[in-house]
């Protein structure tokens, strides 16, 4: 397996529902070790595109090639029914069998190991997101699909989790499809950006996209400047209580 | 007191409680109690068809309940009615059709009460075989699909994205539910089988903080309900089905006290 192996490729992918296109003509490719980020306004088809990639729709137009079955998914919204008592530890092994060590180290990475025996319903929004991310990385996937993975996480945590995502893609050499609204962080931690607005508006490296006109029209001139402010390397990761838990080269 | 039929009833009851525990948990988690009820109501129709055509009762109930399940899924896709309206429609129609057919079958001596509420005296050694072999099959299949079924119960899309094939396991689960109804109607009855599915599980929910514990407590609750219920049924001569469900209810009420205590501590 070489580094440039394509994990997933969407060709002209789209979905037509209730007499309108939810999203159309999306070309997208994710390779090993690559982070591809989808940005775009609300309703621009980011989640839909991710779901097309995951094969969650029965009828789509265009083509999706998947070259891996080791996929992990962090959905935008997960609600746990109150009729179901579920601890973090039970949730970690939902779709996979894991060793205790693997569970612990994944929870440790996202800074929520102390919540292992807590009930999922007792977690705060940010804690829950950290658990979702831990579950997704614990199985050491080849493709990781993250739909707004840090929503509700505090600011320091947000930066830490994004650099964790970056580390994961390097350590596991896995491809990551990331959906995010946090333009400032995204632009510095991603290899390839696809800007959606019902179709692919523009795409390319973060710098290319930030300088392109469609991007400026969608997000305004100011967001282009965000890139230069935040383009620096993070050298450490914080746990949820703010302590530095890992140095990153 | 240990007449033959009492021993048979107890063995049958234990067999059914072992299956209703785990299946009941999924019925509660997936909010399928009305769905289970609808399948159960179709069992009366199944019994009558089996008498009319002189074919095996359990098999007929199983086939009819499975057909009803398929019909429901069809209608859900093709009509604009909400799930609960469709369930009500099918549930009461099948019950009504069953009772109308019964009116035509006046030449047969038929114990309606027995089918509606369960008749423990009618459980013969052949039924025991059906209950235990059928029950064992249900549990084997359930344990085989446990992980994907559980994952798709927690989050359907997450399970599907990660290759758990939720659509297939959901269909298999529906068939297991139909099979449970087929083997337990004689004992518990059409109107009360959902009670045995739901109430011990509801009790278990009050006392547990993880899924495994809930399944185990649900089985224990079911076993206690069946054993105490049958004892009461023999001693004070009540119908077996209602007695079992009343015991389950008492256990549920006791479990509520445990919750209250937990909150005050």
Image (cartoon, coloured by chain):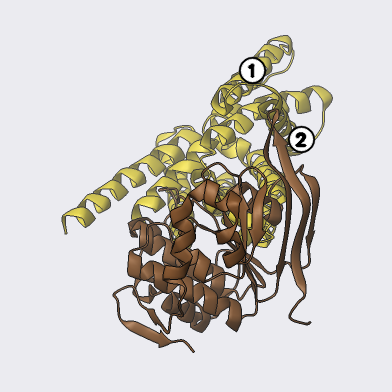
Chain colours: A brown, B yellow
Quickly name the residue at label 1: B93
Around disc 2, counting alpha carbons within 10 Å, would you say few (fewer than 14), some (14 to 19), or many (20 or more)? some
In depth, the one of B248 and A217 nearer the eye is: A217
Q: Position of residue B12 (x, y in %)?
A: 59, 48
In depth, the one of B85 and B191 nearer the eye is: B85
Q: Residue at x 49, y 59 (%)?
A: A224
Q: Residue at x 52, y 71 (%)?
A: A189
Rendered image: mark on residue B63: 2
The answer to whether residue B24 is visible is no
Question: Where B11 falls versus B113 (above or below)?
Answer: below
Label 2, label 1: how far apart the Cα atoms are: 17 Å
Secondary structure at numbered mark 1: helix
In depth, the one of A14 and A225 nearer the eye is: A225
Q: Position of residue A59 (x, y in %)?
A: 77, 42
Chain under callout 2: B
- Tell me if label 2 and label 1 are in contact, CB under 8 Å: no
Q: Quadrant of the C terminus of chain B?
A: bottom left
Q: Position of residue B37 (x, y in %)?
A: 56, 32
- Return the residue found at the far left: B264
Closer to the chain start, of discs 2 and 1, is 2
Q: How many marks?
A: 2
Question: Where B5 falls versus A249 (above or below)?
Answer: above
Chain under callout 1: B
Marks 2 and 1 share the same chain = yes
Q: Residue at x 49, y 70 (%)?
A: A134
Secondary structure at numbered mark 2: helix
Q: Residue at x 54, y 39 (%)?
A: B32
Question: Where B100 falls versus B154 (above or below)?
Answer: above
The answer to whether residue B222 is visible is yes
Q: Position of residue B191 (x, y in %)?
A: 54, 29
In depth, the one of B239 and B3 nearer the eye is: B239
Around disc 1, counting alpha carbons within 10 Å, would you say few (fewer than 14), some (14 to 19), or many (20 or more)? some
């Amino acid at each position: 397996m070489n580094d440039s192996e394509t994990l997933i490729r969407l060709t002209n992918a789209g979905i037509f529902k209730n007499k309108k296109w939810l999203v159309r003509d999306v070309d997208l490719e994710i390779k090993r070790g690559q982070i591809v980020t989808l940005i775009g306004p609300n309703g621009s088809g980011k989640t839909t595109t991710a779901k097309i990639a995951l094969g969650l729709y029965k009828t789509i137009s265009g083509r999706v090639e998947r070259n891996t079955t080791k996929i992990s998914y962090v959905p935008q919204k997960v609600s746990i029914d109150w009729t179901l008592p579920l601890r973090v530890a039970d949730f970690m092994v939902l779709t996979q069998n894991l060793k205790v060590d693997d569970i612990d180290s994944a929870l440790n990475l996202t800074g929520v190991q102390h919540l292992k025996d807590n009930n999922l319903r007792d977690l705060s929004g940010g804690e829950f997101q950290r658990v979702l991310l831990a579950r997704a990385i614990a199985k050491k996937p080849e493709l990781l699909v993250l739909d707004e993975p840090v929503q509700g996480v505090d600011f320091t945590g947000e930066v830490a989790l994004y650099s964790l995502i970056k580390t994961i893609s390097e350590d596991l050499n896995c491809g990551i499809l990331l959906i995010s609204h946090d333009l400032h962080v995204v632009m510095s931690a991603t290899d390839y950006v696809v800007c959606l607005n019902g179709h692919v508006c523009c795409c390319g490296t973060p710098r290319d996209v930030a300088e392109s006109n469609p991007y400026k029209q969608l997000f305004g001139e100011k967001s282009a400047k965000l890139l230069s402010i935040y383009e620096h390397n993070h050298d450490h990761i914080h746990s949820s209580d703010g302590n530095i838990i890992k140095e990153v080269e | 007191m240990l007449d033959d039929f009492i021993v048979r009833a107890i063995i049958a009851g234990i067999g059914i409680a072992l299956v209703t525990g785990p299946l009941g948990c999924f019925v509660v988690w997936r909010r399928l109690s009305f769905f289970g009820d609808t399948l159960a109501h179709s069992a009366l129709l199944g019994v009558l068809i089996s008498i009319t055509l002189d074919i095996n009762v359990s098999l007929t109930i199983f086939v009819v309940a499975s057909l009803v399940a398929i019909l429901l899924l069809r209608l859900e896709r093709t009509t604009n009615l909400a799930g609960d309206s469709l369930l009500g429609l099918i549930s009461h129609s099948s019950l009504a059709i069953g009772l109308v057919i019964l009116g035509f079958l006046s030449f047969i001596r038929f114990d309606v009460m027995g089918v509606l509420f369960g008749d423990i005296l009618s459980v013969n050694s052949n039924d025991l075989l059906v209950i235990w072999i059928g029950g064992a099959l249900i549990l084997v299949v359930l344990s085989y699909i446990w992980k994907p079924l559980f994952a798709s119960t927690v989050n359907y899309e997450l399970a599907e994205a990660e290759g758990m094939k939720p659509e297939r396991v959901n269909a298999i689960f529906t068939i297991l539910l139909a099979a449970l109804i087929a083997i337990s109607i004689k004992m518990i009855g059409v109107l009360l089988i959902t009670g045995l599915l739901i109430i011990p599980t509801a009790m278990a929910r009050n006392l547990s903080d993880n899924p495994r514990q809930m399944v185990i407590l649900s089985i224990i609750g079911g076993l206690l309900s069946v054993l105490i219920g049958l004892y009461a049924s023999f001693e004070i001569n009540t119908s077996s089905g209602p007695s079992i469900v009343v015991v389950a209810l008492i256990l549920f009420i006791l479990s509520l006290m445990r919750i209250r205590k937990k909150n005050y501590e």
